[in-house]
Amino acid sequence: MLTVEGLLMTESVRLAEYAWDDAESFVDQLESLCHQGVLPEPFYRELVSGIVKTTGSTAASLWQLCGNQSTLLARQGIDTHEPDSSGEPNVHDWGPNSVWLNSKTFVATQRLALDDLDTSSATNLNSGESRLFLRLRFGEPAELALRNPIEDVCAAVMGIASTVWLRTHCHDLQQSLVDRNRRDQIVSNLHRGRTLIQSLGTIATVIANETKADRVSVLEIRGGRSRLVATSVATRIDHRTRLVRSMLAMVDVCITSPVPFSYSIGQVSYNVGQDEGRTDDAAGLARTNLAEAYVDESGSRQLHVETVFASESDRTPVAAFVLERFRLPSHKPRTLEDTGSHSDTGLHAKTGHHADTSPHSDTSPHSDTSPHSNTSPGSCDRASADLPTRFGLIRDVAAVATREALQRDRHAWQRLVSRWADGNAKRNAFVATLVAAIAVAVLLLLPMQLSIPAEGKLVAKQSAILFAPRDANVESIDVTSGQRVRAGETLLRLRSPALELQEKTLAGELATYASQLAVVRASKSSNRRESNSNAALPQGDQRVLQTMVDSLQQRLKLLRQQQAGLVIKSPIDGIVHRSDMQETLAARPVARGQELISVFDPDAGWRIALDVPDQDIGYLINANQTPPARCRFRLRSDPAAVFQGQVQEIDNTSHITPRGTIVVRTIVDLNDPESEPKLDSFRVGSTVMASLDCGQRCAGFVWFRSLIEWAREQSWR
């Protein structure tokens, strides 16, 4: 007979068995989610939700503790607290082990094994050890029979949760390392370059790469006036162009405002950090008008102007960035919230450079309004805000690199000027006079070699270019490019249908007249017995026919000679030179005088054909007396090797190159015995960079020849 105590024990055992069944299913579900690589936030929510259902608790919360700092990871249900409790977990109360705080509260703990800290005492929780805590709240006191299953399932759940946390933590550490390396690489790239142009050019290139801008220009500002120093796309800048002048005019107005300025085609311009779309003031209208003029000139679709100040306290502008895009993105660009702060530069999240609220540094996303929509500027498409946002991630480090580059450039001159200014006035005047006298003496008395640069190509001394003798078709090509041939060897064969038709026609006419002549001769022998008057007519016909036969034979001989001329043969021993014979000649018609093929003999020697600028040919003519002027040249394909030569011939006429410059063709023979082993690298048509020696002149004339020639030219105008 069962007693009341026995019935209660049986009910408790049954409840424990049901709890174990639910716990096993729940743990299997969590392990499956863990293996699937679910993100930590959904996993933690699923964990606390499942633990509430499995244990029958009214509330559950999952906490992460590192030292004295606690972080709530997930919460489920209504959690009631004691009257004097703030609801936050207390490390000293919970301790390092799982424990029932009372009949309604159970706390499970799991150490996160990031190091070898000793977990035997609770003092380690204050020394930086990390743990996970799962706190369960029950509406009624938990059954004693259910406490062991609850403790076991919480232990299993916490083990799985720690695996997810450690995996996430390792991924964050790895990403942090990647971001740090990328940030260090960006900072290193921003501080490259020795001169000001090199430094600012490198900064412009890095900004263009990181912001996805098509062109970035860096301008130096002195005395309120801007000067374009470097861009990300050009190595040389022509400050006389309308494009540069238009940019300078726009930047000069934009730097008067302490906030950046953005503009997009077809959208409202705005100052980043102020009221978007406000262009009703005079300065705003001026910036917009100048931006429109510059966009019309440059062809860009979007631009962003950012000013660099001397320091946070000194608001004097020292430089400016102009970022441009020539095509707006057709799709919605990814935001920082979508891609993560490390997707572009890795500078925002790890350096603490969040968007400033000050007017001069606000780079929060803004959008423009399309002229075809009725939305307000604050709800516009984010394409126009993408460029300022991307630049905002590296704005601070780019500004620091720019200020340091300007300071390095200015300090070099400032040191020299300060040393000079601090000296004695009379001594400075004497030193200046002495230096000027020495400089003039060096310029006038120091002899230097005057060299004229020229470009040309390499040619063989002995070469032959073969042309088509008449209109014909290419019947066969018997050689290949680069093949060595002998004089008289057949290169290609032509076929002329017109010549063949003429030959057949003449052959037919010749046969006709020859047969008629044979008949006349036969009739003459048979009529000898007749009278002399009757024999005169056949004798006259015989002479006419004989003349016609002789003429036709001569014409037929000439035609056959022309036919033989259609077989193109090499006039010299050498190498065939034409790489596109099969593509341009095989089975194709050619016109009379068309270049067919060329043959050159490399064993006969080499020479170079130089195009000397017309304004420099006078120096070469004066120097090319006895002995001839010397020449040093390099092959563009092998610039390390230097060859010597002498001017052999200077043309008496000038011609215009495809570039539009007037040049005089000059032939230089190669006469360097030491270069004979290197001649195997010579190729016909190779580009040559030459320097022609035109005698000794004073150093001042050699260094300032362009200025002297310009002054001479101006004196004739």
Image (spheres, rainbow, N blue to C red):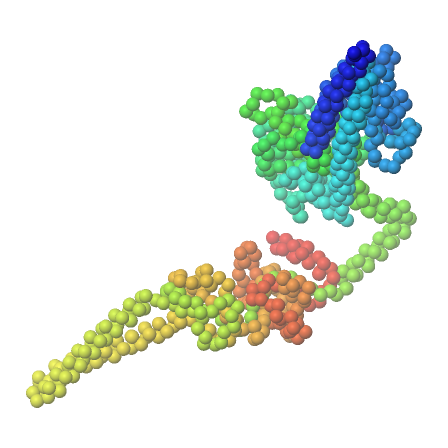
Residue at 79% x, 61% y: name it: 441
Relative vertical location of residue 42 with respect to residue 583 in this rendering, above or below: above
The image shows residue 606 at horizontal and vertical percentages of 58, 71
The image shows residue 44 at horizontal and vertical percentages of 74, 26
Residue 308 seen in render: no
The image shows residue 554 at horizontal and vertical percentages of 29, 77
Q: Which image quadrant for residue 698?
A: bottom right
Residue at 76% x, 42% y: name it: 181
Q: How many marks?
A: 0
655 on left or right of 59: left
| Residue closest to the eye, 597 or 608 | 597
Residue at 48% x, 62% y: name it: 580
Relative vertical location of residue 385 with respect to residue 533 in this rendering, above or below: above
Q: Which image quadrant for residue 350?
A: top right
Q: Identify the residue at the far front of this view.
A: 1
165 on left or right of 490: right
496 on left or right of 357: left
126 on left or right of 447: right
Relative vertical location of residue 358 with respect to residue 347 in this rendering, above or below: above
Residue 9 seen in render: yes
Residue at 68% x, 37% y: name it: 211
| Residue closest to the eye, 587 or 653 | 587
Relative vertical location of residue 100 with respect to residue 466 in this rendering, above or below: above
The image shows residue 208 at horizontal and vertical percentages of 67, 40
Rendered-image quadrant of the N terminus? top right
Q: Which image quadrant for residue 273?
A: top right
